[in-house]
Image (cartoon, rainbow, N blue to C red):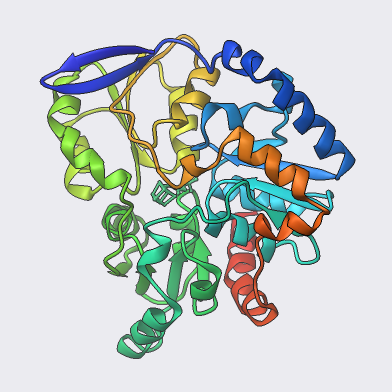
Amino acid sequence: MQSITDQGHIFLAFEAVYSQQMIQDKEALVLRIKQLKKEKDVVILSHYYMPAELQFELTDGGFVDFVGDSLGLSVQASKTEATNILFCGVKFMAETALLVNEGKQVYMPDPSAGCSLASSISAEDIRGLKKQYPGVPVMGYINTYAETKTELDICCTSRNAVAVAASLEGDKIIFVPDVYMGENLQKVIKKELGKDLILWNGSCEVHEQFRNFLPQMAADEGAELLFHWEVPEDITGIMETGRKGIVGSTGDILKYVQQSDAKRFYLASECDLSVALMKENADKEFVTPCVKCPYMKQNTLEKLLDALEAIGTPNESAYRVALDKNVIDAAKKPVLRMLECSN
Ligand code: 13P
Ligand code: SF4
């Protein structure tokens, strides 16, 4: 990685795909992980925001079965035939894997990995919204805990939010909890579906930091801009000045870059998404202030190995994601309803 200093801000321009050296340095760990996952019948799922070493896929000689965005991972979790799922991501994602996979065991390298959006709303809050807006359907971002999901009508991820909104009756939708994603979505949903969103005041503490970098993106006129939906709307509004790029989900960003003829991109999303971007687009250059999600980074190769060692032993409860049966029964309904919409 190369550092560039611009008006006091450090930018990182990525020159290489994730380093083979990094993996070679940890070869012994990687070999043990491969052996244990086979012995214990474990599928390893990893989000694109994982540190590079946890995006080391089977197809590259690594140990991760599938790297994906939150929708891709939910779908993969629902399809797996393995007895155990080891989920490298944050807790609401691993809970979702459990909801669509009753009877299987779900583990995480660090089950305390949270999310500022998921923590911003409770089931009680949703009950309050339903009283305030009777009859209005509640569409909840997948970035909510299972307990909160018990009160949702339907879930959505960043990739299918517009399609899910289209599936709902009426001209109003309560969308929780991300106010910024809601404001970005509102523009598209109003234009395409003529519907209005009622919003909650949650936010992603990672994506809202892009507020600090507007002057740098504005000045980098040669770069196309890549925004996650969770970046505040007053920043994504720069697209209305004629800049090229996309406001969308992680999956949309990856697809956009592959289809674009541009050679330089400014990434306004989690820094480690650049691993997949670089891997799939070796001829293109990515610039980002490299904002990292502290929760996603709680996952490490060493903790993943500890979790694998623990599966099937008395220590496994330290890594296992557990939910009450009544929470599973109620929370899986909005998730399954969403998956039906995404097929
Ligand atoms: P995706 O749905 O794009 O994977 O996003 C998940 C997330 O947590 C973004 O911050
Ligand atoms: Fe949650 Fe934001 Fe981290 Fe995604 S990036 S897991 S929304 S805190």
Residue 243 shows in this picture: yes
With respect to residue 234, does 300 lie above or below? Answer: above
Please count the marks in the image: 0
Q: Quadrant of the N terminus?
A: top left
Residue plotted at (48% across, 74% down): 148
Residue plotted at (61% across, 68% down): 337
Q: Foreground: 200 or 86?
A: 86
85 vs 145, left or right, is right
103 vs 111, left or right, is right
Residue 10 occupies which quadrant of the picture? top left
List the single residue furthest toward the right.
39
Q: Quadrant of the C terminus?
A: bottom right
With respect to residue 75, does 244 lie above or below? Answer: above
Residue plotted at (42% across, 55% down): 115
Q: Foreground: 159 or 62?
A: 62
List the single residue furthest toward the front.
314
Q: Percent from the top left, x then y, of residue 295?
A: 45, 47
Residue 292 occupies which quadrant of the picture? top left
Residue plotted at (46% across, 9% down): 283
260 vs 82, left or right, is left
Q: Percent from the top left, x then y, of residue 163?
A: 49, 57
Q: Foreground: 139 or 92?
A: 92
Q: Percent from the top left, x then y, of residue 335?
A: 60, 66
Q: Percent from the top left, x then y, of residue 132?
A: 30, 88
110 vs 162, left or right, is right
With respect to residue 201, does 158 lie above or below? Answer: above
Residue 62 shows in this picture: no
